[in-house]
Image (cartoon, rainbow, N blue to C red):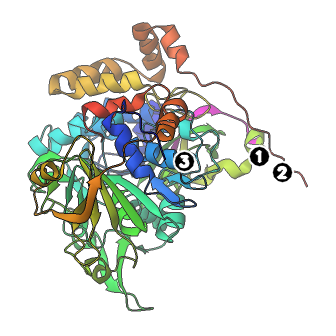
Amino acid sequence: MHTHPDDYIKPELMACCGAREITDGNIVIVGTGFPTMSANIAKYTNAPNATLMQESGVYDARPVRPALSVGDPCLNPGAAMIGGLVDVMGMFLQSGWVDVGFLSGSQVDKFGNINTTVIGDYEKPTSRLPGSGGANPIGSLAKKILIIALHDKRRLSERVDFITTPGYIDGPGSREKRGLPAGTGPGVIITNKAVLRFDDDTKEAYLATYHPDSSVDEVVSLTPWDLKVSDDVHETEPPREEELRVVREILDPFGMIKIYEGRGYV
Amino acid sequence: MPMKEAVQRYVIDGDFLFIGGYICRTPFAAVHEIIRQKKRDLTITRSNAADDFDMMIGAGVVKRFIGTFLSLGLYGLGRCYRRSIEKEIPHKIELEEYTNLSLPMMLMAGSMGMPFVPVKDMAGSDLLNVKSFMGEDKYKVIDSPFDGSPTVLVPALNPDVAIIHVQQADEMGNAQIWGIGGDCKVGANAAKKVIVSCERIVSREVIGKDPSRTIVPDFKVAAVVEEPFGAHPGYTPGFYDVDFSFGSLYQQASNTVEGFEEFLNEWVFDVEDRTAYVGHYIERFGYPTFKNLEAAFDFGYPVSYAY
């Protein structure tokens, strides 16, 4: 049995949830901050032979502190290979080698579509967001997508304002019809309240586990669509002692993960 | 050649510019010179744009942006970018949006003289539902002539000028980098001419000691400018670190139009060139702060090309 210390913060729990989605030997493409932390926890726990890459051109980096962006200087020394975008996004991702892609979204809907482009109308947005960057190709082409999102009725939606990155688009068969590779798509949405997974038949996200300080009722009430609840819904396993040790002693000795606590995570 | 002269001679109002960098080796000295010379109506491109593109948009030198992303990273959304798109300050730029796969592939196609290139992303997303100045030429969807499957084609890009910052180059322009590449190599080689900004000019002999590092050959290069600290507040591997404090300074300044203008006055218009910029930096923050950005030395083993 694992021990579960109770002094963890929410971003640590979310990072651990992400880590547990990675299988040993996976090739993982990660974005800034959170995803990198998660994937590295996996490397030290359940998936020692997983390898990471960043879209900027880095494969198997060995950073001595958490990378603050996919272009972070700490990704350079010690990496196994450094090229550029065409190498990682073309030779590795587009050619089908990447098992897991890890994305965060300003707005995520029930089919796992992600919006990082605009809130409101595209031509006259209330808020202009950064855009796709690597998110669209990662969401289109990695075999399994992990999504990190904040759980409220603004960040989650029945339908995103703009599909920057396709999830299951309109439901079953949509990806295949648009020509996206078979066997790809979102696997899980990890929020600050719960873990949602996707129904094989409807491709809709449902509640799998709720975090220790939350409940089925709270999660359902914070979700803007008619959230289905798994028959075996249960509490999310809190961070294990070993996972926390990896975060605090090895990956993030200066506690930089705390910056995600104030603003959720992204 | 000084940056002032390189930008005067080779960047013309209305030009289409590729500007390299990925926080890593951002050609900031050139970006500041473009703003200082008040160039107009530029079209700019690169995957994953950051503070440098935000600054050019805020300064009003940009008409069009072929992009994938623009943010200040750790410091959030690009303030000038938002003001341009949301409030038309100083004017609304025209925006054509791709991704970090399709845009580098378009530059790669341009660099290789290919007319267009198939890509496997963007399908099923709203990126295919928004078109700006490229109109119907933004992309085409065809049935693959080989297996009939739906295939997205995107056009090659051939910028008028590419500006890149590299660790070292010789006087003729053979340019060498190490570290995160972004779309620098394909972007530079897609352009009709290249301005190379570098930390140091080295001899042709030094280039020849490790020629595999060269990403642009001299025959494509119009100007070589030696600009130590030229990527600040971005970084150059082996030379200096990212200046996170300066990133925060820019974020705070660019929160308002007035703050942004004061920033431009202090760091662009009131300094004559990069040397004066570095001088002002040291004056403002102290030599220890400047020195603190300097990279440690951790040389790799020298390679041998002998036979």
Seen as rendered, the residue at the extreme right is B307
Both labels 1 and 3 in a single chain: no
Q: Mark 1 sits on what residue?
A: B208
Q: Mark 2 sits on what residue?
A: B305
**Would you say B95 lies left or right of A237 here?**
left
Expressed as whole percent of the image width and height from the top left, the position of residue A75 reads 55, 41
Of labels 2 and 1, the one closer to you = 2
| A173, above or below A7, in the image | below
Seen as rendered, the residue at the extreme front is A1
At label 1, which amino acid type do we have? Answer: Gly
Determine contact: label 3, label 2, CB under 8 Å: no
Q: Tell me if residue A227 is in the magenta stretch.
A: no
Expressed as whole percent of the image width and height from the top left, the position of residue B188 reads 50, 53
Q: Tell me if residue B201 is in the magenta stretch.
A: yes
Between residues B204 and A252, which one lies in front from this camera angle? A252
Give, as a single range, the part of the protein colored magenta. Answer: B195-204
Per the image, label 2 sits on a secondary structure element best described as loop
Q: Residue at x 48, y 73 (%)?
A: B114
At label 2, which amino acid type do we have? Answer: Tyr
Q: Main secondary structure of the magenta part?
A: strand
Q: Earlier in the sequence, mark 2 or mark 1?
A: 1
Q: How many marks?
A: 3
Q: Quadrant of the N terminus of chain B?
A: top right
Between residues B52 and B4, which one lies in front from this camera angle? B52
Q: Label 3 to label 2, Cα distance in Å?
A: 41 Å
Q: Chain of mark 3?
A: A
Q: Which numbered marker is on residue A45?
A: 3
